[in-house]
Amino acid sequence: MLDGKKVIAVIPARGGSKRLPRKNILPLGGKPLIGWTIEAAQNSTYIDDIFISTDDQEIADVASQFGITVPELRPEELSTDTATTQSVLFYTVEKYAKEADIVVLLQPTSPFRSSDHIDQAIESLVEKSAFSVVSVTPCEHPPQWANTLPDNGSMKDFLRLGDGKRSQDLGEAFRLNGAIYVYDLHRLLAIGEMAYREDTYAYKMPNDASIDIDNQIDFDMAEFFFQKYWC
């Protein structure tokens, strides 16, 4: 709780993952991947309740090892490849936590996001009276150097006018890192979507805390970072 506001965390953890099977419970540093996020939420100064949304009994069993009871498995319509994080979040808060004031969405694929990061993002939401606060990290490469390609691979107009500068001459750019999404829950429910608005603010995180595991290369990188910084 912060300034009398009840804070809840929602951790969405689907069992199916085509690029990295069973990724949410793969062992990283001696504990299941989702355990890193559960412990970060548990160590937060402000989070009052934690809800895990999953369609997988094994994930629910792992959550119970960390003291979290999963009240139900997701309904079938929220267990498909096309189900959105937004639909999962709305279902969870409307069923279990409509009385809360702030909701923090924490994806289990960001193991190095800490309780301090979470608390600072929550504090930012309250201090700014924001609709939402979303975590970002510096881009590893200038986004001006990226573009789509046609089927024939032609690079005509690949770089937009004025983008052929040295990287050091380009301004610092940031990207979403998927680690933290904090919302004023009352306004979120009223608006009805996880929109990026004028009163959505960035919470900046360093690259080494911004690993987002989607495939085997990401997981290998996380293991490298664990060995380098945590051992």
Image: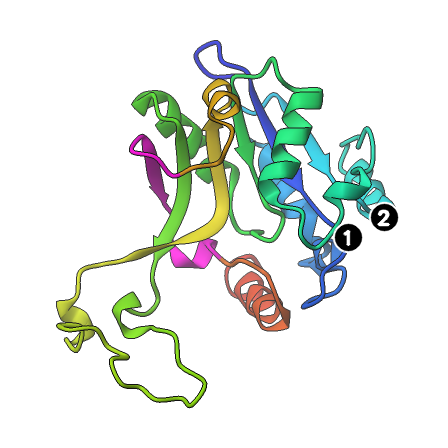
Q: Is residue 16 left or right of residue 140?
A: right
- Which residue corresponds to the image point at 15% horizontal and 73% vertical from the top-left? 161
x, y percentage for residue 62?
Answer: 81, 44
Task: Judge whether 142 appears above or below 131 on screen.
Answer: below
Q: How many labels, in total? A: 2
Q: Is residue 54 visible?
A: no
Q: Quadrant of residue 24?
A: bottom right
Single out the mark in the foreground, 1 or 2.
1
Q: Is residue 88 left or right of residue 229?
A: right
Q: Which residues are magenta?
A: 196-210
Q: Residue furthest front?
A: 151
Mark 2: amino acid: Glu
Color theme of the render: rainbow
Magenta stretch containing residue 187, yes or no?
no
Residue assigned mark 1: 15
- Which residue corresponds to the image point at 28% horizontal and 74% vertical from the top-left? 145
Disc 1, disc 2: CB below 8 Å?
yes
Which of the labelled discs sits on residue 58, or is there none? 2
Task: Judge whether 90 appears above or below 61 on screen.
Answer: above
Q: Quadrant of the C terminus?
A: bottom right
Task: Judge whether 126 appears above or below 177 on screen.
Answer: above
Q: Is residue 67 visible?
A: yes
